[in-house]
Amino acid sequence: MAHKAAQWPSEETLLLWKREQARLKARMVDRDTEAWQRDPTFSGLQRVGGVDVSFVNGDSDRACASLVVLSYPELKVVYEDSHMVHLKAPYVSGFLAFREVPFLVELVQRLQEKEPGFMPQVLLVDGNGVLHQRGFGVACHLGVLTDLPCVGVAKKLLQVDGLENNSLHKEKIMLLQAGGDTFPLMGNSGTVLGMADIRSRDYIRRTLGHPGSPAQRQERSQKEQRPKVCPKDGPGAPADQGRPPEDYGRDSSTDLKDPQPGFQEQQKDQQLERTEHHEDSDL
C-alpha cells in the first residue's frame, strides 16, 4: 500500500517546532553527571547503545528504526530491535528530530518494558548534538525525552557559530596522524561544540585494507545487497536516503561518523581514496 509523501511543513509548523526545541533545550543537561563520564578509562560504563533510521531505497518516507546495545568494553551485542516505520514529517535541515525522534523514543521505551537490565548508559545518535543551528540537535532532543546521556555522531561540518570548512580546518584534519588524535571544534562564542578525529578512518584502513581494490568493492557490493535490518520487510537500504545530499551529516552536521552507504559505490571508493583522514566529528 502506497503512502502519501510527507508534505513540506507550513511556516506555522516550523515556528511551533522552534518553540518546542527552545522548551526542551531549557531542560537539557550539558555537563557530566555520572562518575564513569569523569573517569578517563570510563570505569563503570557497562552498556553503550546506538540508534539510527535507515531508509528504504527509492523511498524517502519508509524507513527502519533500529536500536542496538553493546556491552562495554567487550562491545558484544546484548540487545537489538528494528522496526519498519513510515515517516510523517519531511526532512528539514535543523529539524531532523521531528522526523525521526518519535520512532527512536519508541525503541527506548520498548527496551525499558522488555529488557530493562539492558538499558544503555549512553546512546550514540546518528545526528548532531549541541552543534546545531539552535544548539539543540536530534541527539539533544532524544536525550531530553529519554533522560539518557546522548552523543551526536555525524560526519559533515555544520557551519555555525563561526565554524567553517575552510583551508585552516582542513589543515587541522591533516595533522591528525594517529588513532585518538583530535582537535576541538570551537565556535566564535568560545564554546567547544564537538571534536574531530580519525579513529574510524584508521579502523577502515586496518579492517578493510585498500579501499579501491576490485575484490573489496565486490565484497562490499555483495554485503550491501544482503538484507541487514528488518529483513521481513525487504532489503536494507542506504541510511541517508530521503535527505538532500548536501545534508548527509544529519542537520548538516559534524560529529564522529564515517560515511554511510547512501553513496554510490564508486563515490565511496573515490572518497576513501581521496583522503586518508576522517573529516570532522561532534559531541
Image (cartoon, helix red, strand yellow):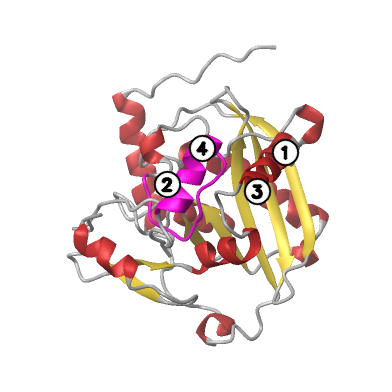
- Mark 1 vs 3, N-terminal side: 3
Can the viewer see residue 263? no
Snapshot quadrant of residue 189: bottom left
Which secondary structure, mark 4?
helix
- Mark 2 vs 4, N-terminal side: 2
- What amino acid is labelled 4 in the image? Gln
Query: Could you say where residue 22 lies in the image, as x and y percent from the top left?
Result: 34, 50
Provide the residue designation for mark 3: 216
**Callout in the foreground (1, 3):** 3
- Mark 2 vs 1, N-terminal side: 1
Query: Could you say where residue 213 lies in the image, as x and y percent from the top left?
Result: 59, 49
How far apart are the alpha carbons under marks 2 and 1? 25 Å
How far apart are the alpha carbons under marks 2 and 3? 25 Å
- Mark 2 vs 3, N-terminal side: 3
Of the pair 260 and 24, the residue shown nearer to us = 260
How far apart are the alpha carbons under marks 3 and 4? 12 Å
Can the viewer see residue 21? yes
- Mark 3 vs 4, N-terminal side: 3
Residue 222 shows which numbered tag?
1
Residue 139 shows which numbered tag?
none
Residue 249 shows which numbered tag?
2
Residue visible at 26% across and 69% down in the picture: 191
Residue 266 shows which numbered tag?
4
Taking the image as shown, residue 228 lies to the left or right of residue 195, namely right
Point out the image quarter for the C terminus.
bottom left
Image: magenta residue range: 252-274
- What amino acid is labelled 1 in the image? Gln
Query: Could you say where residue 61 lies in the image, as x and y percent from the top left?
Result: 56, 25
